[in-house]
Image (spheres, rainbow, N blue to C red):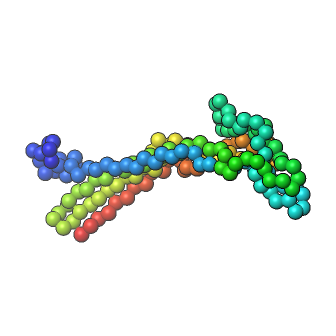
């Protein structure tokens, strides 16, 4: 009511009653372990051995970590890599909403709302494949952890 308080009733019903809201979700990457799949009977699959530096200066979706830094441990031995040694990409999402409340009569109210999920349509990616027994996929990120932009509309009549 601070601005445009002297508007006629019809103009006030059209211009007034608007509200906005939003939620921003930001997160660091999820930890993961580099593993291998055992093909020897009695030797369970486990974490891999570290044989070099797994960090890359500029990780990209096709090569998130240095897969050559890991190897399959000796048979019937446990790998020496730490649990959750590496971290995947971070997460960013912003949801927003616009609401319009209109009092039609003293007891009759109309609410219109538009909600935008992932309004910036920013992709957030999952952890890379980390099983060194599948060399064609190891270190690659092939999926997203967020959905594409979504818009929904709603209307409610209260009496």
Residue situated furthest bottom in the rendering: 159
* Occupied quadrant, residue 101: bottom left
For the question of whether residue 137 can be seen, the reply is: no
* Occupied quadrant, residue 53: top right
Answer with left or right where residue 101 lies relative to residue 140: left
Residue 54, above or below 146: above
Residue occupying the point 71% across, 42% down: 140
**The one of 43 and 26 positioned closer to us in this rendering:** 43
Residue situated furthest top in the rendering: 57
Q: How many marks?
A: 0
**Residue 129 placed where, x, y %?**
71, 47
Residue occupying the point 34% across, 55% down: 113
**Residue 48 placed where, x, y %?**
78, 48
**Residue 90 placed where, x, y %?**
55, 43
**The one of 30 and 123 positioned closer to us in this rendering:** 30
* Occupied quadrant, residue 111: bottom left
**Residue 70 placed where, x, y %?**
78, 42
Residue 108, above or below 129: below
**The one of 12 and 133 positioned closer to us in this rendering:** 133
Residue occupying the point 85% across, 59% down: 43
Residue occupying the point 23% across, 57% down: 102
For the question of whether residue 11 can be seen, the reply is: yes
The C terminus lies in which quarter of the figure? Answer: bottom left
């Amino acid at each position: 009511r601070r601005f445009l308080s002297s508007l006629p009733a019809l103009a006030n019903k059209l211009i007034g009653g608007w509200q906005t809201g939003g939620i921003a979700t930001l997160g660091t990457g999820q930890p993961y372990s580099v593993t291998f799949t055992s093909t020897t009977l009695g030797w369970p699959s486990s974490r891999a051995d570290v044989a070099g530096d797994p960090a890359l200066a500029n990780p990209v979706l096709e090569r998130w970590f240095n897969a050559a830094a890991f190897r399959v441990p000796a048979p019937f031995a446990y790998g020496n890599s730490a649990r959750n040694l590496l971290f995947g990409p971070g997460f960013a999402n912003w949801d927003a909403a616009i609401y319009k409340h209109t009092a039609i009569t003293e007891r009759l109210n109309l609410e219109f709302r538009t909600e935008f999920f992932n309004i910036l349509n920013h992709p957030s990616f999952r952890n890379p494949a980390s099983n060194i027994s599948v060399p064609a996929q190891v270190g690659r990120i092939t999926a997203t952890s967020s959905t594409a932009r979504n818009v929904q509309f709603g209307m409610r009549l209260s009496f």
